[in-house]
Image (cartoon, grey):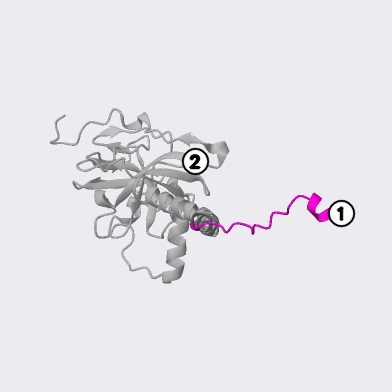
Amino acid sequence: MDTDAQLPERDRTPVPDQGPEERSRSARFPDTAARFRFRPLTLLACCVAFVLLLSAFVVQPFLIPSTSMEDTLQVGDRVLVNKLAYRFGGEPRRGDVVVFDGTGSFVHRETEENPVTGLLRGAGAAVGLARPADTDYVKRVIGIGGDRVTCCDKRGRIKVNGEPVTEGYVYPGDTASSVPFDIVVPEGKLWVMGDHRSRSRDSRDHLGEAGGGTVPLDKVIGRADWISWPVDRWTGLDRPPAFSRVPAPAGVHG
């Protein structure tokens, strides 16, 4: 008996060849995987670009490097500087804490910095991780254009346009100023001082220099609105009521 005849016939058809569509689909898998691997880097680059743009045009973290604004601001605090505060017609007001470029007012010499070091420092400063540039300062606005600012009355208070100002933010134990002065702030300029008066180099220290220690409005980087770090110091930097009774400068009518 032919036993082979009783067995079912084997399917000798070769494995069908993949069509062009199948081969094309398979070939795309490596490309997709490669794109997926690089996506986190792209996302990281986009995040960094977004943070830098935000810091450049909207709000910038600013590391406090000195004691000149104690107790309001302490060394190591990070404040958020609102760069839009004065961009659309607004101007600094008495009592505002501002960050400004002191070139031409507080700094009258060229500063030299290694380009690579400067780039790294600038990137770190943009996100509040490094000291700001040596020409950047944070102070409180005491007088605006047209104001007459004098020191001091019989009780040791600064007067603005003849009105004594009780400065509750001044560092405990400090006087309003150990240096007497009497200045009319030019239009378009600011008279600024630190809250820790005995530790602050501010407008008073530059009276005999070009500009008389006043800061041009176009050098103001922004208004410090918030302490964002450390966490236990989270707070807003509201404008104090100390200047609420100061009259408008002479010749200015509201």
- Helix, strand or loop at label 2? It is strand
Three-letter amino acid code at disc 2?
Ser
Q: Main secondary structure of the magenta part?
A: loop
In the depicted view, which residue is nearer to us: 165 or 194?
194
Residue at which label 2 appears: 228
Callout 1: SS: loop
Residue at 36 percent of width and 36 percent of height: 157
Q: Residue at x 46, y 42 (%)?
A: 174
Name which residue lies at 47% across and 40% down.
227
Q: Position of residue 51 (x, y in %)?
A: 43, 49
Residue 14 as seen in the image, left or right of residue 176: right
Query: Residue 1: x percent and y percent?
Result: 87, 54
The answer to the question of whether label 2 and label 1 lie on touching residues, with beta carbons closer than 8 A, is no
* Other residues around mark 1 within 10 Å, as few (<14) / some (14–19) / many (≥20): few
- As drawn, the label of residue 1 is 1
Location of residue 76 in the rendering, given as x and y in whole percent from the top left corner: 53, 49
Count the marks.
2
| Three-letter amino acid code at the position of disc 1 | Met
Name the foreground residue: 164 vs 213: 213
Q: Let me know if residue 14 is in the magenta part.
A: yes
Q: Give the magenta range.
A: 3-20
